[in-house]
Amino acid sequence: MRIVPNLLLFFAFIFTTIDINAQEQEPAAYVVYDDYNLYHTSKDSIALVFVNMAYVREEPTSKSNLLDSIPLGTKVKFIEEQGLNPTSLRGMYLPWHKIEYSSNNQKKSGYIWLGLLTLDKIIDQKSGNTFCYGFSWKSNELENEYYWVEAKMLDKNNNIINSKSFPYYPGGQSYTTASLTKDSGIPNSKNIFSVNFHGEACGISSEQNYLSWDGSTFTTLPKTVAVSDAGVFYYSEELLLPNKHKLGKDIILKICEEGEAQEYEETDPEAELKYTVKKKEETYKWDGKEYAKTMVKELEN
């Protein structure tokens, strides 16, 4: 087939126009559609700077111009939903987010790498201190992948009072929250700070990591887990702190319950499931430094 010169010029114009438009429409940054839901990154949500000093960039990359450096405890607001340009730092593959914050009574904005921010935080209204936690780093060892979680206590001026760390082994948990309770019965304990990783689907466990705060230091308490697979089995753990038993203020009990579904009658598939249940009780005693397991016994149903 013979193509006339005018037609060749027409095709050249079309392809050149397409190429120019493509260049003009090419995004400046790679958009991350995964919501990284262990972080609370929805638009207008608030996080705190979790490291001693965090850099704010003009664009979502560590090679971009440095706009500012903001210290530990600074409040930042997410002003866009999506994350951009995921980057590997300290073993964590996380995106950049556009934030807004105040510095010297001026409102500013820029991009920050997500791993520099808290996962969640709670302000104690009585003392004004802030309980917060985040990921310090991630180990990507084969068959031994875990995050190193750090809980921090900040005073009213965002100075760190104390911190405590523990590992978290991810298993499909979809979100994380914190809670704060009082009146545990533990000597000198002012608050129990709970760091929770939740699993919403069948077969994905939830776990609660408990830290007792005495006003100056954190003490690690036994953690609990719970998991279920609808219609097949469940497993749950519950802590009984000294205010829930009469065994002494240096004792913590953990009640572990496991249920396995019995086979139902095929003639009545709508009948309520019955479970074969096993229970055990673990005893933890304060030895002056930590709560150590001292006894395990089976319980009657």
Image: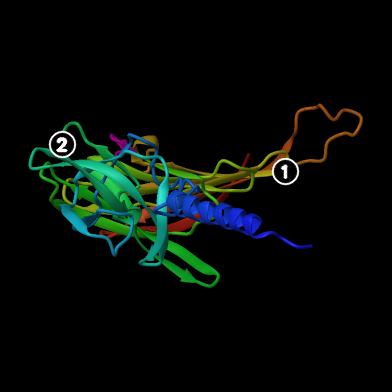
For residue 230, which quarter of the picture? top right
Q: Which residue type does callout 1 highlight? A: Val
Q: Which residues are magenta?
A: 179-187
> Looking at the figure, which quarter contains the N terminus?
bottom right
2 and 1 marks in contact (CB < 8 Å): no
Front: mark 2 or 1: 2
Out of 20 and 6, give the one closest to the viewer: 6
Q: Would you say the magenta stretch is mainly helix, strand or loop? A: loop
Left or right: 29 in relation to 231? left
* Residue matched to label 2: 128
What percent of the width, then of the height, locates residue 113? 32, 55
Q: Position of residue 191 (x, y in %)?
A: 26, 40
Circle 1 residue: 232
Q: Counting other residues with Cα less than 10 Å from the Cα at mark 1, is it few (<14), some (14-19), or many (20 or more)?
A: some
| Figure colour scheme | rainbow
Rendering coords of residue 103 (x, y %): 12, 43
In the rendered image, residue 227, in percent from the top left (x then y), is placed at: 58, 45
Q: Is residue 107 magenta?
A: no
Q: How many discs appear?
A: 2
Q: Residue furthest front?
A: 5
